[in-house]
Image: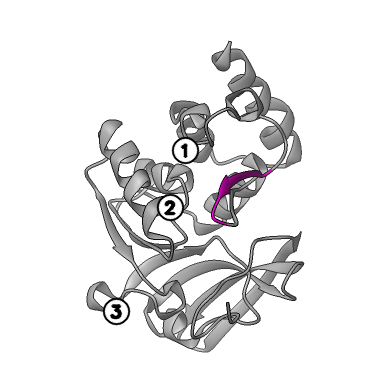
Amino acid sequence: MYNQKMEQMITTQLMARGIRDERVLNAMRKVPRHEFVAAGKEEYAYADAALPVGHGQTISQPFMVALMTQALQLQGNEKVLEIGTGTGYQTAILAELAKTVYTVEKVSQLSEEAQVRLEHFGYDNVHYRIGDGTKGWPDNAPYDAMIVTAGGPLVPPSLYDQLAMGGRMVIPTGERKFQDLLLVSKTEDGKEVISLGKCGFVPLLGEEGWED
């Protein structure tokens, strides 16, 4: 049942909207999304929508996961920083595509449950931290790529500072409820920013984001 729903998601939600990176599509075929949603929500796992997972957080819409991941252009040897572990679904996709993933989550229960879930599926290239994601994880910087799964008022300076030269960050910024999804690249000539479209993420809370 889930395999059919997954393939329908790939075809009608992702490929039909321009997701072309075969590595991203294959990762989303491999990771069982229904194992990463809140209990009782499994039947909606492959629907074209974000789903609540408790603590005021959500698991992002499949298309948004694919779009953000594709924008990073991962080749397999990168060190990636993820801000907002959530249930670990986006983390698993990144772990399929990159060499190492460092993931930071503000809500301790979500982080701990995600770690158990990801270890169950054999992901041993993920490192976990509980804390203020807007400050990044400086001990392991610089990062080749970053993905921020909550919307802030601007790009946190600490995150940009921890991005490697030539690195790419995908982050929603703007108002508290609605944002622009930005692809931010660090180049020798400075910061390059491209808008990937409108979106609506939960607020990025922290010292360099929104106040609680």
Query: What are the residue bounds of the magenta stretch?
Result: 50-55
Q: Which residue is mark 1?
A: 23
Of the pair 64 and 19, the residue shown nearer to us: 64
Q: Give the Cα separation between the discs numbered 1 and 2.
A: 9 Å
Q: Is 187 positioned to the left or the right of 65 in the image?
A: left
Q: Amino acid at mark 3?
A: Pro
Q: Where does residue 192 sit, x and y in percent of width and height? A: 59, 80
Distance from label 3 to label 2 (Cα)? 21 Å
Instruction: Report crowding for label 2: few under 14, some 14 to 19, many 20 or more residues within 10 A (C-alpha).
Output: many
Q: Is residue 34 above or below residue 96?
A: above
Q: Quadrant of the N terminus?
A: top right
Furthest residue to the top?
Answer: 1
Amino acid at the residue labelled 1: Arg
Residue occupied by mark 2: 74
Name which quarter of the figure residue 46 lies in.
top right
Q: Specify whether 145 is left or right of 44.
A: left
Image mark count: 3
Crowding around mark 1 (Cα neighbors within 10 Å: few <14, some 14 to 19, many 20+) is some
The kind of secondary structure element at disc 3 is: helix
Q: Position of residue 110 (x, y in %)?
A: 42, 51
Q: Nearer the viewer, residue 176 or 9?
A: 176
* Element marked by disc 2: loop
Observer able to see residue 19: no
